Image: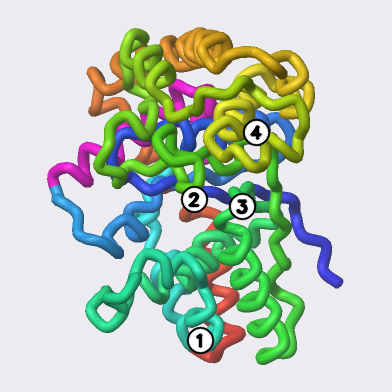
């Protein structure tokens, strides 16, 4: 078995201002991972257009995601941060994977079923096959590890299946089988208005999410108005699991404090929600306020952000292009 260099790949879609779920579920982990691994971080703009996008807003969002990465602590001088569409190897490898992957595999993807809903015949082909592009994103760099939220584990399993099938089909030991990295209590941050739904930019209620660009008083207000009930905070994990909104608030605060959720629950057991919400609001302000200010500073110099992306593209291409050339030889294109 080939010994692969340990490398992390991950990406975030530029579909509007990033929210707390993006930070706690992904970007916070990016900062920690760069201490241990060589990391390749991508603004996945090609994934974004699987649904309709306003082109001018998309261009602006790409820079805002980059600014959010840097403001949160990702070191662009030591790690690679780039724009997906600027490295053609992603889409070139994706086509090969379209021919390796099986339709039955894609039909089982629960996220596609959720997003397509009853309108499956009218959604774009891209929405269905974007897990193949995700596999290409990862494997174009022979990445060995991928930080994923709970809702992305199925896509990573597909990437592993594609890598394994490619290796088997062509009798090679070329692709690693990337391993998931799942961190902390807030790998999946839920809506502040409905603890059974993931926090999302597409939710019509602004009070369902906390943005990394929200002002302090807005953060406090959103947390204070987060859905809860009239009972006291439960004492047992079993009771907590039956209260999705309370569980979400406990998990978010635990992630902010870098504590286990059971430890946080013990601190608030039997107390009123107002106490938990005040402490959560204060913690979020402490974390988000400096990030928000740095995002604004960085967005005031968009030329510099564009230069950072260009440098990242050069670094990413230097890794991906030779790998793609080897893949072309294996497939028979060269």
Helix, strand or loop under label 4: loop
Q: Main secondary structure of the magenta part?
A: helix
Name the residue: 44% across, 10% down.
Answer: 290
Q: Comparing marks 2 and 3, which lies closer to the viewer?
A: 3
Measure the C-alpha gap from mark 4 to mark 3.
21 Å
Measure the C-alpha gap from mark 2 to mark 3.
27 Å
Q: Which mark is residue 228?
A: none
Disc 2 packing (10 Å; few <14; some 14–19; many ≥20): many
Of residues 179 and 212, which is closer to you in this image?
212
The answer to which of marks 2 and 4 sits earlier in the sequence is: 4
Q: Which mark is residue 316?
A: 2
Helix, strand or loop under label 3: helix
The answer to which of marks 1 and 3 sits earlier in the sequence is: 3
For disc 4, the marked residue is 34
The answer to which of marks 1 and 4 sits earlier in the sequence is: 4
Of residues 238 and 304, which is closer to you in this image?
238
Name the residue: 39% across, 75% down.
Answer: 128
View extreme (front): residue: 230
Question: Is residue 217 placed above or below 150 in the rendered structure?
Answer: above
Q: Is residue 81 shown to the viewer in this render?
A: no
Q: Which residues are magenta?
A: 56-81
The answer to which of marks 2 and 3 sits earlier in the sequence is: 3
Of residues 237 and 263, which is closer to you in this image?
237
Measure the C-alpha gap from mark 1 to mark 4.
36 Å
Query: Is 272 included in the stretch rendered in magenta?
Result: no
- Give the x, y percent position of residue 52: 20, 59
For disc 3, the marked residue is 150
Q: Which mark is residue 334?
A: 1
Helix, strand or loop under label 1: loop
The answer to which of marks 4 and 3 sits earlier in the sequence is: 4
């Amino acid at each position: 078995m080939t010994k692969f260099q340990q490398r992390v790949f991950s990406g975030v879609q530029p579909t509007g201002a990033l929210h707390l779920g993006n930070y706690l579920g992904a970007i916070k982990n990016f900062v920690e991972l760069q201490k241990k691994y060589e990391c390749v971080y991508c603004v996945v703009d090609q994934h974004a257009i699987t649904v309709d996008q306003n082109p001018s807003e998309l261009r602006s969002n790409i820079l805002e995601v980059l600014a959010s990465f840097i403001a949160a602590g990702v070191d662009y001088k030591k790690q690679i941060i780039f724009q997906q569409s600027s490295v053609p190897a992603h889409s070139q490898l994706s086509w090969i994977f379209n021919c390796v992957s099986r339709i039955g595999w894609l039909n089982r993807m629960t996220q596609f079923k959720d997003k397509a809903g009853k309108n499956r015949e009218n959604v774009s082909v891209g929405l269905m096959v974007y897990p193949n592009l995700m596999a290409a994103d990862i494997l174009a760099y022979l990445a060995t590890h991928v930080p994923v939220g709970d809702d992305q584990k199925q896509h990573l399993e597909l990437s592993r299946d594609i890598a394994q099938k490619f290796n088997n089909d062509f009798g090679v030991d070329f692709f690693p089988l990337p391993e998931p990295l799942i961190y902390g209590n807030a790998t999946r941050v839920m809506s502040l208005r409905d603890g059974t739904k993931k926090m999302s930019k597409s939710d019509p209620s602004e009070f369902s999410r906390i943005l990394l660009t929200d002002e302090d008083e807005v953060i406090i207000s959103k947390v204070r108005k987060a859905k809860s009930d009239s009972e006291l905070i439960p004492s047992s994990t079993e009771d907590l699991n039956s209260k999705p909104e309370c569980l979400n608030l406990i998990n978010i605060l635990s992630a902010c404090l870098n504590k286990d959720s059971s430890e946080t629950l013990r601190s608030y057991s039997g107390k009123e929600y107002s106490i938990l919400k005040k402490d959560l609001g204060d913690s979020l302000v402490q974390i988000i306020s400096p990030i928000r200010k740095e995002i604004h500073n960085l967005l005031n110099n968009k030329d510099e952000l564009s230069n950072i992306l260009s440098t990242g593209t050069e670094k990413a291409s230097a890794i991906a292009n030779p790998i793609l050339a080897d893949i072309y030889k294996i497939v028979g294109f060269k």
